[in-house]
Amino acid sequence: KKKAVPSWVVAGGKTVGLRVPDHNTTLALLKLCGPLAATSANLSKDEPALNATAVKKALPGIDHVIPGKVKTGKASQVVDTTAGLKVLRS
C-alpha cells in the first residue's frame, strides 16, 4: 500500500486488495468515477453472497446493491502478488 491510501481502506493492514469485476454495470461505474473502496459482499468467514438478494441479507445496512449475480456461481479468486504469485483462494 502506498502512503496515499488511507489506513481505513486496508483495515490496518499493509496491502491493498484489488478486484477486477466481470460485470458491465460495475465496470461502467468504475470508468466514470475511478477506483472504489468497498468491502466484500459478505462478512469474513460467511458463505459468499452470489446474488443481489444474498448481499442485501448479508449486509442489510448498505445503501445500494447493483442487481445481478455472479456468472461462475462461486466467490472471486484471490491472488497474493506481494512476493511472487500465490493463490490464496480459487
Image (cartoon, helix red, strand yellow):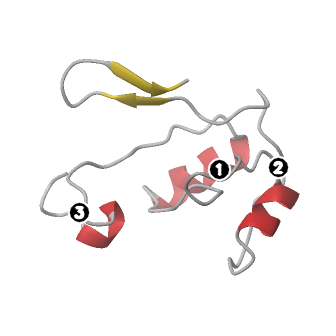
The amino acid marked with disc number 3 is Val
* CA distance separating discs 3 and 2: 29 Å
Residue located farthest toward the front when viewing the structure as drawn:
45
Residue 48: x percent and y percent?
70, 46
Q: Which residue lies furthest to the left in this view?
A: 3
Q: Where is residue 88 in the image (x, y as percent from the top left)?
A: 43, 28
The image quadrant where one finds the C terminus is: top right
Disc 1 marks a residue whose amino acid type is: Thr
CB within 8 Å, label 3 to label 2: no
- Near mark 2 (Cα within 10 A), the count class, few <14, some 14-19 or many ≥20, is some
Is 18 placed left or right of 54 in the picture?
Answer: left
Residue 27 image point, x, y percent: 61, 45
| Residue at point 66%, 53% (across, down) | 46
Mark 1 or 3, closer to the camera: 3
Q: How many marks can you see?
A: 3
* 75 in relation to 38, above or below: above
Residue 73: mark in rendering: none
Residue 5: image tag:
3
Q: Nearer the viewer, residue 38 or 34?
A: 38
- The front one of 53 and 21 is 53
The answer to which quarter of the image holds residue 13 is bottom left
Q: What element carries label 3?
A: loop
Residue furthest out toward the right: 53
Sort mark 1 into few (<14), some (14-19) or many (20+) by Cα contacts within 10 Å: few
- Is 19 on the left-hand or right-hand side of 7? right
The numbered mark, 3 or 2, whose residue comes first in the sequence reads: 3
- Residue in view at x 54 percent, y 29 percent: 77
Q: Which residue in the structure is indicated by mark 2?
A: 51
Q: Mark 1 points at which residue?
A: 26
Secondary element at image label 1: helix
SS state under label 2? loop
